Amino acid sequence: MQNQSSKLKTDLKQRAYKYSIAVIEFLDALPKDYSCQIIAQQLLRSATSVGANIVEAKGASSKRDFTNFFSYSLKSANESLYWLGLLRDAKKIKNTQLECLLKETKELANILGSSILTLKGKKQL
């Protein structure tokens, strides 16, 4: 079981890393107007924080600390959903890449949320 848990953590870390790269590529293609650039800065910060906090969790000193880093990662994913939704709804950009990022952000948030519940003993795998 420990080996499977370790693999899941590695997969999540790699998935979050690839997500960060996809967001960076997406942001580089955004229009260069004022509002897009402000939102881009916020989205870059929150989206890359998802993976950064997952990596930080690896060095956690306790289960509670580990859970907290996953919680920070979840909060960053939720914030990223907000910024992506804002770009979509303000009709700043309309493409399949945006929809793919929204889908991946939701999936990462769901994985993190489920992991947090498991870590807190509120959900069984």
Image (spheres, grey):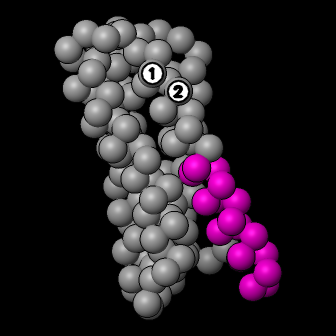
Q: Main secondary structure of the magenta part?
A: helix
Q: Secondary structure at mark 1?
A: helix
Q: Position of residue 20 (x, y in %)?
A: 52, 42
Position of the C terminus by quadrant: bottom right
Left or right of 57, for residue 89: left
Residue, x 48% and y 74% (percent of image)?
57
Tell me where residue 68 sits by quadrant.
bottom left
**Residue 11 covered by magenta stretch:** yes
Q: Position of residue 122 (x, y in %)?
A: 49, 78
Q: Nearer the viewer, residue 32 or 120?
A: 32
Left or right of 99, for residue 41: left
Q: Is residue 30 above or below residue 78?
A: above
- Work out how far the residue at label 2 is from the one at label 1, CA to CA, in angstroms: 5 Å
Q: Position of residue 18 (x, y in %)?
A: 62, 44
Question: Badge 2 local density, few (<14 within 10 Å), some, or many (20+)?
Answer: few
Residue, x 49% and y 51% (percent of image)?
109
Residue annotated with mark 1: 28
Residue annotated with mark 2: 25
Q: Is residue 43 above or below residue 115?
A: above
* Amino acid on which the number 2 mark rests in the picture: Glu
Q: Secondary structure at mark 2?
A: helix
Question: Badge 1 local density, few (<14 within 10 Å), some, or many (20+)?
Answer: few
* Amino acid on which the number 1 mark rests in the picture: Asp
| Contact between labelled residues 1 and 2, with CB atoms less than 8 Å apart | yes
Residue, x 37% and y 26% (percent of image)?
85
For residue 107, say whether it is visible: no
How many labels were placed on the picture?
2
Residue range highlighted in magenta: 1-17
Position of the N terminus by quadrant: bottom right
**Residue 102 covered by magenta stretch:** no
Q: Is residue 114 above or below residue 1?
A: above
